[in-house]
Amino acid sequence: MPLGTNLSLSTRILGMIVFGLMLTSLLIGWRSEEVLEEAMLEQSKRHALIFLKGMKQEIQRNGSPLDKALVQRVLTNSTDIIEPSFGFSLLQSYAFDEHGQLIAYLGSSSPLPKNMSGHAGEVFRTGLPYLGDDIERGVDPLTGKMVHKVDIIIPLHEAGRVVAGLEVEINLEETMALIQAFDNSYELDILVIVAGSTLLVVLFIGWVVKRGLIAPLRELGALTERIAHGELSSRISGLRQDEFGHLGDSINRMADNIEHLFDEQEQAYLQAMQSLAKALEAKDAYTARHSSRVAKYSVALGRRLGLDERQLRLLKQGAMMHDLGKIGISDTILNKPTPLDDDEFEVMREHPVFTASIMRPLKRFKEFAEIAAWHHERWDGNGYPDGLAGESIPLLARIVAIADSWDAMTGDRVYRKGMTVDKALSILENEQESGQWDPRLLRLFIEMIRGEQQARQAVEEDLFPG
């Protein structure tokens, strides 16, 4: 599995941003530190150059640069004017002529003649000072320790031409110590600044990413999830004028097409089921009348329960087709003029499964299949075909179960006459806690039927007093 695939998109984006910020900050810090170190070294060299120019002026003011005694005296006195603020001290200083021979020197040992093919000769040829391009390591004659040093050479003029060179080896240990102290403080400051600025940037970018990228992606993902679960009317509103807006518009149009296709398929399937219902009606007239009455009682109870119009429509259609599976039952069983025996009853018990199988392709109207499959389940779990209990039985199936039982008691069968409303109500009242039906729904149903009876009696008394 590729690295990072288990991380969220926002985490990966913020991680890349943090990495980029840290790397950029470190590179900037490293480069700025390098530039500042170079500037500090350059400043020390400039101080040394000013120091040498002061020696040069003193030599040229008092005589010839080739005067060994004069030059030696100036070199000897030079150490007295070096200040601590210069950031350096002298290791050695000497003057040499155009042939590289020493004129004077100051140091612990006598230097060798100069090689005029290098920087020293370049100073004679160009007339420009040399400011020591490279920092070298050398021995401090006073302490015997290895120190950082650099050579600086300036030309000495006489009669308009370069006749000698004045060179000093300066000890940069003070400058290097200052740079080291600066580095420690600078690195700490950079670390604090980088950490603080990175935190602020990450928080800001995190907010921007979450608001401008992650939130739209989640919204689009939630939309596609709802569509995938059958909520084909779901759409995304308030489309933005960017890539997410275009993507959202594409998903909306895709959902429109899918919904239209499903509507056409479901309408065709509903028409097919209605044709099956008519075929069942021709085969068993009782079942057709029974389904109509069950639908009427179910919708009345649903209204009393406060269901919305969509649920009431589903309840009505589901109740109308709740016994559609009986089309697969033999005519001899359906139209038997006497009560069914055990084997025939077992065959009849299969009709909810048949009905649910017929309705299952209606994905958006799963309530149809639920009503068909479970309207013979019992509140206590002893029903069929799946033994569901309590509220695990869908609400619409529980409603149809009561309406179906009511019409079975009060409706006429081939082999028996339906019982009276009062007798049926008495049975329901006595069996409210029997475990067959949802007690709360049954009480509402009884109240509803009682109310209808009382209203009917009141009308009859008005029409036929006495």
Image (cartoon, rainbow, N blue to C red):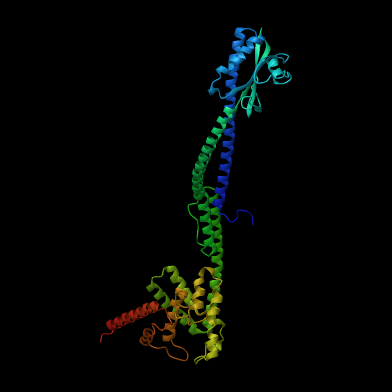
Quadrant position of residue 304: bottom left
Tell me if 278 is positioned left or right of 432 in this view: right
In what quadrant of the picture does the N terminus appear? bottom right
Q: Write down the quadrant of residue 254 in the picture.
A: bottom right
Query: In this orientation, which residue lies closer to the viewer: 154 or 331?
Result: 154
Q: Is residue 226 above or below residue 272?
A: above
Q: Is residue 390 above or below residue 179?
A: below
Residue 273, picture quadrant: bottom right
Quadrant of the drawing holding the C terminus: bottom left
* Residue 293 in view, yes or no: no
Q: Residue at x 61, y 13 (%)?
A: 74
Q: Does 317 appear above or below 191?
A: below
**Would you say 62 lies left or right of 219 here?**
right
Q: Give how far across and how far down residue 356 sits, in percent.
A: 54, 76
| Depth order, front residue of 208/106 | 106
Residue lying at the far left of the rendered structure: 466
Q: Nearer the viewer, residue 22 or 305?
A: 22
Where residue 158 appears, as percent x and y from the top left, is: 66, 8
Q: How many numbered circles are shown?
A: 0
> Where does the image place residue 165, in percent across and percent down from the top left?
67, 15
Spot occupied by residue 282 in the image (x, y as percentages of width and height) = 53, 83
* Residue that appears at 45% across and 71% down: 313
Image: 165 above or below 279 = above
Is any atom of residue 211 visible in this view?
A: yes
Q: Nearer the viewer, residue 225 or 52?
A: 52
